Image (cartoon, helix red, strand yellow):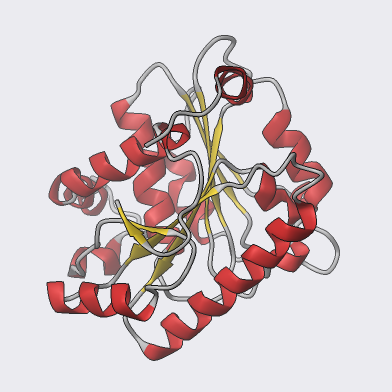
Amino acid sequence: MNSAPAEQSIGRAQRGITAIFANSKGGVGKSTLALMMSLGLATRHPNAQVELIDLDSQATSSDSLRRFANRRFSVKNDDHLFLASGSPNNGNIINHIDSEPIGGNAQRYIVFDSPAGNEPSRSSFLCHCNIIFIPTSVSDADIFATRKYLTSLQQLFQRQRQAYENRQPVVIILPNLVDSRAEFNDIRHALADVQAFIGNPLYYSPLFRKAFREQDDDGNIKALLRDYDGYIKWLTKTFIECEQLNTNPQQLFQL
C-alpha cells in the first residue's frame, strides 16, 4: 500500500482522524459498529481523545454510550449539527472536524454514526472524513441499497473533487450480520465491480441484540468487547492506519 504524502499526513493528524459508519439503509449495523469502534478506541488508546458523534435524531448510539463518557471519551448528539429538515448541517460538521482538539497534543479520533435515509448528495461533509465504513448484510435489499449508496457517493466525490483537491475518503464495505463464509463470499461477488475495499466479515451473534441495553454491571458490553476482541482490533487498526490506503481501488479489493 502506498503511503500518503508527508505534508498531507501531518495536516490530517493535527485535526484528528475521522470515520463515519454510513448507509442509506437501516438495520445494517451502523450503530453497533460505531459502538464497537468508539469503545475499542477508548479502551485501547488511553491517551487519545475519542469522540462519538451521533447524527441520528433517534440518538440510539449517544443515549446508550453517554454513561461511558469521561474526559477522554465524549458522546455528542447536538442540535447544531442538524438542519431543520433533519439533514446534516454540513458547515457546522466540517467546522467541528477541522477544529483544534481540546486535549492539546493528544491524538483525536472522531467517529460518526449516521442515520438511515441520509444520502451523500446532502452530505458534503463526507469528503472531510478520512474513512467511510459502509456496513451491509447479504440480503438483496441491503446489497441493492449499498450499491445505490456507493453510486451516489462516487457522484459526490466527482462534484466535490476540485474543492477537496481530488482527495477522496477511503471507502470500506463491512460485511455484517454474516452467518457463514459462503455468505461473505456472496457479498464479495455481488459487489465485485464497486470502487471500494472490503473488510473482514462480522459474524452474527445474539450479543448484538443486547448491545444497547443498559445493565447494572454492563455485562453485555463487556461480553461484546471480549468475544469480538479480534475484530475490534482489526477495525480500530484499519481506522488508525487508514492513511496507508492512499486511493480507492478501481474494483472491490479485499483487505
Residue extending farthest top: 105
Residue extending farthest right: 84
Residue found 77% across the figure and 64% down from its top? 122
Nearest the camera: 127 or 69? 127
In the displayed structure, 35 sits above or below 138; it is above
Q: Position of residue 157 (x, y in %)?
A: 69, 57
Q: Can residue 87 be seen?
A: no
Side (left or right) of 47 relative to 21: left
Q: Can residue 248 be seen?
A: yes
Q: Position of residue 114 (x, y in %)?
A: 58, 60
Q: Quadrant of the N terminus?
A: top left
Side (left or right) of 188 relative to 10: left
Residue found 47% across the figure and 33% down from its top? 243
Q: Quadrant of residue 165?
A: top right
Residue found 68% across the figure and 48% down from its top? 127
In the displayed structure, 43 sits above or below 134; it is above
Q: Quadrant of residue 214?
A: bottom left
Nearest the camera: 85 or 203? 203
In the displayed structure, 225 sits above or below 113; it is above
Q: Position of residue 198 (x, y in %)?
A: 35, 60
Nearest the camera: 127 or 105? 127
Q: Position of residue 220 (x, y in %)?
A: 23, 54
